[in-house]
Amino acid sequence: MLDVDDLSVEFAGVTVVDAISLNVPDGPFGVGLVGESGSGKTTIARAILRLVPVSSGRVDFNGVDVLALKGRGLTALRRRMQVVLQDPDGTLDPRQRVGSALAEVLAAHRIVSRAEAPARITSLLTEVGLAPELVDRLPHQLSGGQRQRVSIARALALTPELLILDEPTSALDVSVQAQVLDLIERLRDQHGLAYLLISHNLAVVERLCESITVLYLGRVVESGPTAQVLGRPAHPYTAALRSAVPEVNLSGGARTRIVLPGTPANPADLPSGCSFHPRCPTATDRCRSEVPTLADIGDGRRVACHRSAEMLAGTLELHIKPTVDQLADHREMEE
Ligand SMILES: Nc1ncnc2c1ncn2[C@@H]1O[C@H](COP(=O)(O)OP(=O)(O)OP(=O)(O)O)[C@@H](O)[C@H]1O
Ligand code: SF4
Ligand SMILES: [Mg+2]
């Protein structure tokens, strides 16, 4: 369905997405895109939707060369690929009632006739678990979870082939997050949806995505089937992310929490060699000078690390002694 190849994006001469590739097959199928803040997740989504200029690469969507589209072709693309953002407040017009927001999308894309619109709106609201009476509400008269359901209903109104979900639950309370995840799961099964799900929460990706792509500073460091990647990471960064998420079901054995020192580097001034080396507990001299290439390691997996074979063999000692400050930071994050 979606094939992204060697996609790069620069802002003011700084490469923030560096030759990434990913693939979303026909649904029902979820691809998770994970990485720390600033790793380029939203930029990739925006580039696929042609909302930011791409400096090189290729995006193929069901045989359409997305980067060559103009005018009407672009409008059609944005109907076939719908996006749901983290913060529904940014996408819903505060002065527009729920029913009118949905009617507008249906009319703009001529999905149903004017006479059929009310019935379609009722069925969309019901489908996302909202009472049809909410049609007359303004966004501020809804809870965060209800607003996010309206955004999802609006995306579904256009019967898209692909959904891009950018942190769809991270602005919601934990209890509401679970309900919205249940909704995505149900819709996925009912409509055979294909989606690219951006998240920094590996537990969410583990639940909703068959495949996962891990980004670090604009580059893919590991990708492959979610069960394999999270069950036995081949990249120290994936291992570190995973160890920070207690909810992820790990395939047996005790788990050592890895606390990464420092924060990601500035993309304008990337470290030499492997850009993860200043934070990597197992970096060697080779890592400081030679950029690891993304290599196929079998079972559908790709990884960019000089020591992935040792990682997979379980012979690397990843546990590092965090400083007192880092432990304090970590406790704060957990609270
Ligand atoms: N319009 C822009 N102009 C300049 N720099 C940008 C722009 N948009 C994003 N960036 C930079 O690109 C990098 C990637 O940003 P992006 O928003 O894609 O990260 P992200 O992975 O989505 O982070 P988060 O988890 O915080 O949403 C960051 O360094 C950011 O500062
Ligand atoms: S290449 Fe070296 S520094 Fe980079 S992740 Fe692998 S071991 Fe760590
Ligand atoms: Mg983002």
Image (tube, rainbow, N blue to C red):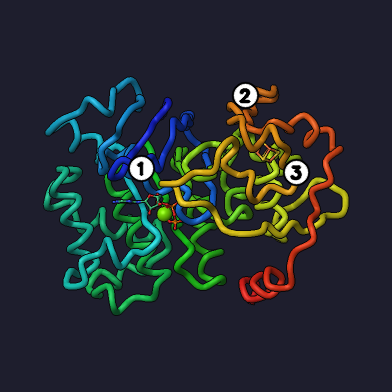
Name which residue type carries label 1. Answer: Val
Between 305 and 104, the one lying in front of the other is: 305
In the rendering, at what x and y percent does residue 72 appear? 13, 33
Residue 277's x, y, as percent? 64, 44
Label 3: state its secondary structure. loop
Residue in the picture at 79% in, 34% down: 312
* Residue type beneath disc 2: Ala
Q: Find out if the beta carbon at label 2 lies less than 8 Å from the nearest ligand 2 atom.
A: no
Quadrant where the N terminus lies? top left
**Where 314 falls versus 60 (above or below)?**
below
Residue at mark 1: 14
- Left or right of 49? Residue 106 is left
- Mark 3, ligand 2, within 8 Å: the answer is yes
Q: Do we see residue 211 in this rendering?
A: no
* Residue 295: image tag: 2
Mark nearer the N terminus (3 vs 1):
1
Pointer 2 with pointer 3, Cβ within 8 A: no
